Image: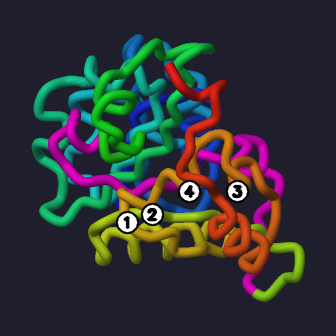
């Protein structure tokens, strides 16, 4: 599968490592240019590209940049992507620590991923936002292993959600359908499932226990 990864921080870098190891054709980009990704490209066999090129021909695109940087992504980011491209959003809103106040989230009540979808002009699948980056490398387990972690996955496009869930299964994790983008507040920072290292039952329970009230630390 052809996969574009936009953002080469901890999550983006480790997804690049695992997805190339699984045999996927990965293009990776960051905000500083492909020359700064030479080491990652050499390590993994991924192709370092400019952000506006990362989605070209891609069946899956991972957007893994700070939320405040989403509006600065290139215009036409998904031009040239596969017709039914699945876009994964790993982002989180940290208004006090990093992102500042975002009106669409604070005043309109949009979930983080619904806001991101609006910015890029394409619906997204929310996944990996509460996953520790090192766990992507260290905690994959085969299907049926009692220690296999589960990740919540939310989105409006059921076909894209299935593509993403299948990809996560390949990576060595179970998934739990966390509902639509309007439901994705259940996996935002400050919720019981955020950072949870449990299986399907634990993740399902944590999603059900979430409160729609955003904790004070995560309000602008």
Question: Residue pushed farthest front?
Answer: 213
Indicate the secondary structure of the residue bearing disc 3: loop
The residue tagged 3 is 193
Lower position in the chain sequence, tag 3 or tag 2: 2
Q: Position of residue 184 (x, y in %)?
A: 46, 56
Q: Disc 3 to disc 4, how far (Cα)?
A: 8 Å
Mark 1 or mark 3: name the one nearer the start of the chain.
1
What residue is pinned by disc 4? 186
Extent of the magenta region: 116-143
Graded by Cα atoms within 10 Å as few (under 14), some (14 to 19) or many (20 or more), the crowding at tag 3 reads many
Number of numbered labels in the structure image:
4
Q: Are marks 3 and 4 in contact (CB under 8 Å)?
A: yes
Instruction: Report if residue 172 is visible in the image.
Output: no
Image point 76% across, 64% down: which residue? 140
Is disc 1 in contact with disc 2, using a CB cutoff of under 8 Å? Answer: yes
Which residue has dot 1 on it? 180
Examine the structure image and report whether residue 136 is included in the region drawn in magenta.
yes
C-alpha gap between disc 1 and disc 3 = 16 Å
């Amino acid at each position: 599968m052809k996969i574009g990864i936009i953002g080469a921080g901890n999550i983006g870098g480790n997804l690049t490592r695992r997805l190339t190891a699984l045999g996927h054709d990965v293009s990776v980009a960051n905000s500083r240019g492909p020359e700064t990704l030479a080491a990652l490209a050499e390590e993994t066999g991924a192709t370092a590209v400019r952000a506006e090129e990362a989605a070209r021909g891609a069946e899956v695109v991972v957007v893994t940049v700070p939320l405040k940087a989403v509006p600065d992504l290139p215009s036409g980011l998904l031009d040239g992507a596969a017709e039914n491209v699945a876009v994964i959003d790993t982002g989180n809103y940290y208004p006090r620590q990093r992102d500042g106040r975002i009106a669409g989230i604070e005043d309109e009540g949009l979930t983080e991923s619904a806001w991101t979808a609006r910015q890029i002009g394409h619906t997204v699948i929310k996944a990996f936002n509460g996953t520790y980056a090192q766990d992507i490398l260290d905690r994959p387990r085969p299907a049926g292993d009692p220690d296999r972690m589960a990740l919540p996955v939310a989105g409006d496009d059921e076909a894209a959600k299935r593509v993403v869930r299948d990809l996560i299964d390949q990576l060595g994790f179970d998934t739990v359908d966390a509902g639509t983008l309007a439901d994705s507040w259940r996996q935002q920072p400050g919720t019981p499932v955020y950072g949870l290292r449990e299986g399907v039952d634990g993740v399902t329970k944590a999603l059900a226990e979430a409160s729609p009230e955003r904790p004070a630390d995560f309000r602008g």
